[in-house]
Image: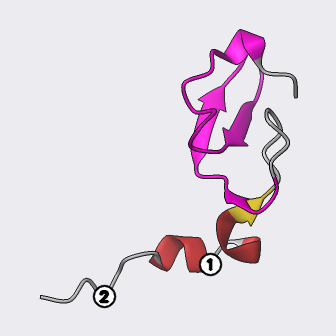
Amino acid sequence: MAKNNRGKTLKNLPAHGRGQCPHCNRTGVKLMYEIKGENKTIKVCKVCKNTPADKLTA
């Protein structure tokens, strides 16, 4: 069967969910993973998703 809803939520986001990761500064990566800090949540790339919130630079 076809997967009709694959990526549907990303298409609604600006730039299809792509941007610059605030931790590793890579450009053009999907920012899908949220890390919850003290007062805010930061969206990071797949590589940085396991980074502890206290080590984030942004």
Could you tell which of marks 1 and 2 lies nearer the N-terminus?
Answer: 2
> Up-down: is 50 above or below 7?
above
Report the Cα–Cα distance between label 1 and label 2: 15 Å
Q: Amino acid at mark 2?
A: Asn
Residue 17 location, quadrant: bottom right
31 above or below 24? below
Image quadrant assignment for residue 34: top right
Provide the secondary structure element on which disc 2 rests.
Answer: loop
Left or right: 11 in relation to 37: left
Q: Residues in magenta?
A: 27-55
Residue 36 belongs to the span the image colors magenta: yes
Report which residue position mark 2 lands on. 4
Instruction: Identify the image quadrant of the C terminus.
Output: top right
- Asked if residue 52 is among those painted magenta in the image, a careful observer would answer yes
Residue at the spot of label 1: 12
**Position in image of residue 53 (x %, y %):** 68, 17
Crowdedness near tag 1: few (<14), some (14–19) or many (≥20) residues, C-alpha within 10 Å: few
From the image, state whether disc 1 or disc 2 is nearer to you.
2
Q: Mark 2 Cα within 10 Å, few/some/many (few <14, many 20+)?
A: few
Q: For numbered disc 1, what is the local secondary structure? A: loop
| Image quadrant where one finds the N terminus | bottom left
Image spot of residue 42 (x, y percent): 73, 36
Q: Give the quarter of the image for residue 28.
A: bottom right
Residue 19 position in % (x across, y down): 79, 60
Q: Residue at x 59, y 37 (%)?
A: 47
Which is more toward the observer, 50 or 35? 50
Amino acid type of the residue tagged 1 in the rendering: Asn
| Residue contact between numbered discs 1 and 2, judged by CB atoms under 8 Å | no
